[in-house]
Image (cartoon, rainbow, N blue to C red):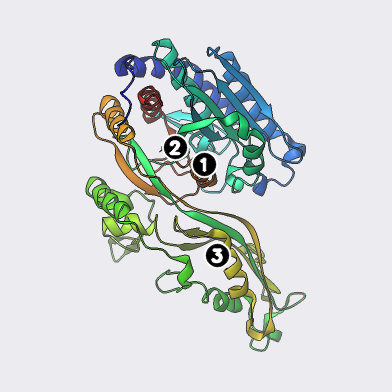
Amino acid sequence: MNAPIPSHVLQPAQALDRLSQVWDERIVPQLTDYIRIPAKSPMFEPGWEGAGLLDTVVRNAADWVLAQQVAGLTAEVVRLPGRTPVLFFEIAATRPASPQTVLMYGHLDKQPEFSGWRADLGPWTPKMEDGKLYGRGGADDGYAVYASIAAVQELQRQGVPHPRIVGLIETSEESGSRDLLPYIDALKTRLGEVALVVCLDSGAGNYDQLWLTTSLRGMASGTLKVEILTEGIHSGDASGLVPSSFRIMRQVLDRLEDSATGRLLPASFHCEVPAERLAQARATAAILGEEIYRRFPWAHHDCGGSTIVALPTTTDPVQALLKRTWEPTLSVTGAEGFPALQDAGNVLRPYTAFKLSLRLPPLVDAAACVQEMKALLEDNAPYQAKVTWESASGANGWNAPDTAPWFAQALDAASQAHFGAPCGFIGQGGTIPLMGMLSQGFPKAQMMVCGVLGPKSNAHGPNEFLHVPYAKKLTAAVAHIIASLPSA
């Protein structure tokens, strides 16, 4: 039998009013300063340690956390040699004799600039417009530490007892959390008996209700390079005799992907969708409908006076959800060996290199896929070209544990209280490496994986924004869930 919900129930209207004020007065200004700092993740900034920008954003966050004067809070920046820093905070329990711990997670490292920002926007130039705070990293995932602290503050302001709370805010998430496991090992004895994880690094199907993430895809990335010459040669002299490195690249990629359908060919890269996730996808498709695919910025072109819109791979809402959450996919996210268009002469290029990003189903082993890819791509290269696959990072996906009755009840109550709609359940196509680590380490913990990355928020791309009204309600929902955690 589940323990009863605590008698000191959070007053939702008061919580949202107060937290809205905290967001406007304290969190938005802090995030505005944060966005201005190009604290790129180590994968995108090899000189991160000398630049000191990751240290700056972590120290700024630590100073803000300490300045909030949360009762029972201690915080410190933890550094292991040669690794990116983390912020660790601890808030003593106010619930009597509670052995439980709530773990709150976020990250402060950012993706690189990318191109295509609106003329009046930029990755490092924050701008508030129509309730949206534009700029790199505000939504992914700079707000998390501030929202987490604000939620606990509201519990204490209303006198709602809470269990012990710890926070782990890293700075290598966008690089596959490559430094996180050593920190978890170093801090393991301080994490405690984790009963609830609050991870605010995920997405939302819309801005009209609370959304719980039920699964995350895994990821494998690296560089595939095809070399055929030691230097560029006049194309009139060599083409036809010297095979094009680009054509060889296409042949090699055909071993991995069916270019006509986008289906990845290795059977081991696929897995069966669990029945519960399929049922949830059908329910979510009924809520979101065509918005699942219409929300993307499709290219338009004119064809004889008619406007044509590029098409998705499917217009079936259920299949659209499954394709972006439970199917493996390949993306080419960068290229090398190509001159800029204005500099492209009649030269047969000596090599072609692609940065590959694979998204893998939640139940597939990423390390095994990386190993299989190396043999698949490198062996028996066409024309005996030099083909190399260099893995950069990899992380397993995650499938949420069974939802405890108290957690399901609390999620729905929080969503109804702050959004006037039931909680939605949705898989996400991105990767949060920590979740797999925590599910293994704390198999009985409930996982509140949520976030502000709703339609058109465009994390990693141009015009990324944080939907502030949604963030305010999500913060209040976090306080509601923590208040609802049953005593052990």
Q: Position of residue 49 (x, y in %)?
A: 75, 39
Badge 1 density bin: few <14, some 14–19, many ≥20, Cα 10 Å: some
User: Which label's residue is closer to the chain start, 1 or 3?
Assistant: 3
Q: Position of residue 341 (x, y in %)?
A: 61, 64
Q: Is residue 24 left or right of residue 191?
A: left
The residue indicated by pointer 1 is: 438
Q: In the image, which is nearer the foreground, mark 1 or mark 3?
A: 1
Q: Secondary structure at mark 3?
A: helix
Residue drawn at (65%, 49%) of the image: 43
The residue indicated by pointer 3 is: 369
Label 3 amino acid?
Cys
Between 90 and 2, the one nearer to me in the picture: 2
* Separation (CA) of disc 2 from disc 3: 28 Å
* Separation (CA) of disc 1 from disc 3: 22 Å
Question: Where is the N terminus found, in terms of image quarters?
Answer: top left
Q: Secondary structure at mark 2?
A: loop
Q: Is residue 468 left or right of residue 256?
A: left
Q: Please, is residue 288 above or below residue 349 in the view?
A: above
Q: Secondary structure at mark 1?
A: helix
